[in-house]
Image: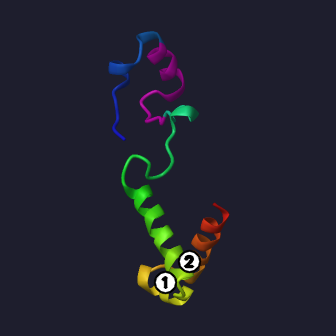
Amino acid sequence: MDYKNGMQVLPPDLLARLQEYVDGMYIYIPRKAENRLQWGRRSAGYAGMLARNQEICRKYQAGQSVAELAEEYYLEPKTIYRILSRQNKT
């Protein structure tokens, strides 16, 4: 996220009104709900995590134990159980 100078992006009357409330302070303006993206959707992070989780499920179904999977993927066993549970729901 980058910062913009309010004088460059806001109409003068709106800027003056905002200055009544937050004169000289930084303010975060959240995205509209319909424009929000879930974590990782802009990068390959989300797709990579999905592929990893599917691979974990395949290995578990092939007989690999939760402890082995946790060690292989550097995750807690609790996380492996959560992944398996979520994959079973879909």
* SS assignment at label 1: helix
Query: Residue 5: which quarter of the image?
Result: top left
Residue 51 lies in what quarter of the image?
bottom left
Q: Which of 64 and 38 is in front in this view?
A: 64
- Crowding around mark 2 (Cα neighbors within 10 Å: few <14, some 14 to 19, many 20+) is many
Q: Which amino acid does label 1 sit on?
A: Leu
**Which residue is painted at 57% across and 71% down in the image?**
83
Q: Mark 2 points at which residue?
A: 80
Segment colored magenta: 14-28
Of the image marks 2 and 1, the number of the one nearer the N terminus: 1
Residue type indicated by callout 2: Ile
Residue denoted by label 1: 69
Q: Nearer the viewer, residue 19 or 45?
A: 45
The residue lying at 51 percent from left, 48 percent from top is 38
Give the CA distance from mark 2 to mark 1.
Answer: 7 Å
Asked which secondary structure carries label 2, the reply is helix
Whether residue 33 is in magenta: the answer is no
Q: Where is residue 15 shown, x and y percent of the image? A: 44, 17
Farthest top residue?
13
Disc 2 and disc 1 in contact, CB within 8 angstroms: yes
Main secondary structure along the magenta-highlighted residues = helix
Q: Is residue 38 positioned above or below 79 on the image?
A: above
